Image: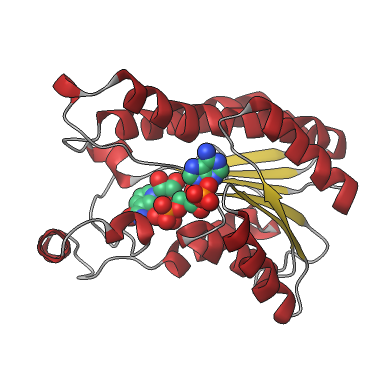
């Protein structure tokens, strides 16, 4: 339904989970996809899967928390595809713990990857998008940015910061016809949530009106929509994909 034919997308954190399904969904809608993460082996498998389905993709080993690697990565995208239309800032980590005992390294790593990483990628993507007077930036936030979560002060602060960043850049860049939105997933079945035990997951499901955890494909579908021409008049928005768990 939503065609992304001839568009070029960058997806960070594409080696697994939501990022991987997002790359597949963007490719399925016709986009060429540069898939970025640190694990080259997993990226190579993803590129193979995309090509096997008739799509075009290339793997970019890129740590989003490293400004030089981000610069080099976006240079590669332009060399390879000659344009950049869609940026999905999806890469993230967790380093959970109670705030009172949180180690400085755990705070810094999460802020640097989940928030500064998105800022660094946006900085590299914007000049190309501004020249083209078109672009879509989609930041993957989280329901916990809206409702809080004990034991995740670093992650929640980074994700709430990402929502603020989304709104600020949306206002800065709207005159150039670039939209900037966030997707806020609820609890989604991915390697990130595999760490939660069965009991925690069962308890979580009782708090989700739709009665199940989300799938990576549920989130990818929202991202494809926000990347499409049909979403041209939506900017600075936070799209909840949470099964009704939190009604903002
Ligand atoms: N799963 C959920 O329930 C849920 C809920 C709300 C929001 N989210 C958000 O959705 C997004 C995807 O989550 P997920 O569940 O799919 O997580 P995941 O399975 O843990 O995947 C995270 C991805 O980020 C990449 N990554 C981590 N650090 C990176 C770095 N420094 N540079 C580049 N890539 C990096 C990882 O790849 P490498 O290790 O190969 O670098 C991996 O591909 C995240 O932003 C997460 O916060 C998830």
Report the side of 44 relative to 134 (left or right). Answer: left
> Looking at the image, can residue 197 be seen?
yes
- The x, y position of residue 52, in whole percent, is 71, 80
Check the image and report above or below for 201 versus 246.
Answer: below
- The x, y position of residue 88, in whole percent, is 60, 48
Report the side of 105 relative to 228 (left or right). Answer: left
Q: Residue drawn at (87%, 52%), measured in percent from left and top? A: 80
Identify the image quadrant of residue 31.
Answer: bottom right
- The x, y position of residue 157, in whole percent, is 33, 28
Report the side of 72 relative to 246 (left or right). Answer: right
Q: Residue drawn at (22%, 24%), measured in percent from left and top? A: 102
Which is more toward the observer, 57 or 146?
Answer: 57
Check the image and report above or below for 234 versus 111.
Answer: below
Check the image and report above or below for 121 versus 53.
Answer: above
- The x, y position of residue 82, in whole percent, is 90, 48
Identify the image quadrant of residue 171.
Answer: top right
Q: In which quadrant of the rendered image does the C terminus lie?
A: top left
Q: Residue drawn at (20%, 38%), measured in percent from left and top? A: 149
Q: In which quadrant of the rendered image does the N terminus lie?
A: bottom right
Check the image and report above or below for 244 versus 155.
Answer: below
Look at the image and name its color scheme. secondary structure
Which residue occupies the extreme bottom position in the image?
53
Which is more toward the observer, 179 or 90?
Answer: 90
Q: Residue drawn at (74%, 40%), measured in percent from left and top? A: 73
Identify the image quadrant of residue 66.
Answer: top right
């Amino acid at each position: 339904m939503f065609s992304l034919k001839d568009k070029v997308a960058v997806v960070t954190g594409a080696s697994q989970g939501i990022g991987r399904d997002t790359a597949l969904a963007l490719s399925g809608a016709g986009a060429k996809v540069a898939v970025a993460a640190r694990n080259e082996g997993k990226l190579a498998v993803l590129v193979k899967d995309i090509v096997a389905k008739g799509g075009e993709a290339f793997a970019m080993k890129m740590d989003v928390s490293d400004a030089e690697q981000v610069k080099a990565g976006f240079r590669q995208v332009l060399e390879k595809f000659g344009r950049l239309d869609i940026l999905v800032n999806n890469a993230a980590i967790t380093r959970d713990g109670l705030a009172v005992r949180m180690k400085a390294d755990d705070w810094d790593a999460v802020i640097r990857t989940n928030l500064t990483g998105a800022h660094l990628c946006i900085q590299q993507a914007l000049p190309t998008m501004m020249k083209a007077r078109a672009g879509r930036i989609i930041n993957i936030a989280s329901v916990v940015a809206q409702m809080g979560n004990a034991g995740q002060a670093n992650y929640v602060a980074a994700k709430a910061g990402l929502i603020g960043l989304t709104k600020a850049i949306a206002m800065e860049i709207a005159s150039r016809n670039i939209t900037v939105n966030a997707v806020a997933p609820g609890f989604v079945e991915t390697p990130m949530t595999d760490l939660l035990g069965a009991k925690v997951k069962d308890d979580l499901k009782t708090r989700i009106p739709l009665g199940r955890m989300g799938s990576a494909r549920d989130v990818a579908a929202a991202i494809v929509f926000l990347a499409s021409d049909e979403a041209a008049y939506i900017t600075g928005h936070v799209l909840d994909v949470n099964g009704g768990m939190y009604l903002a």
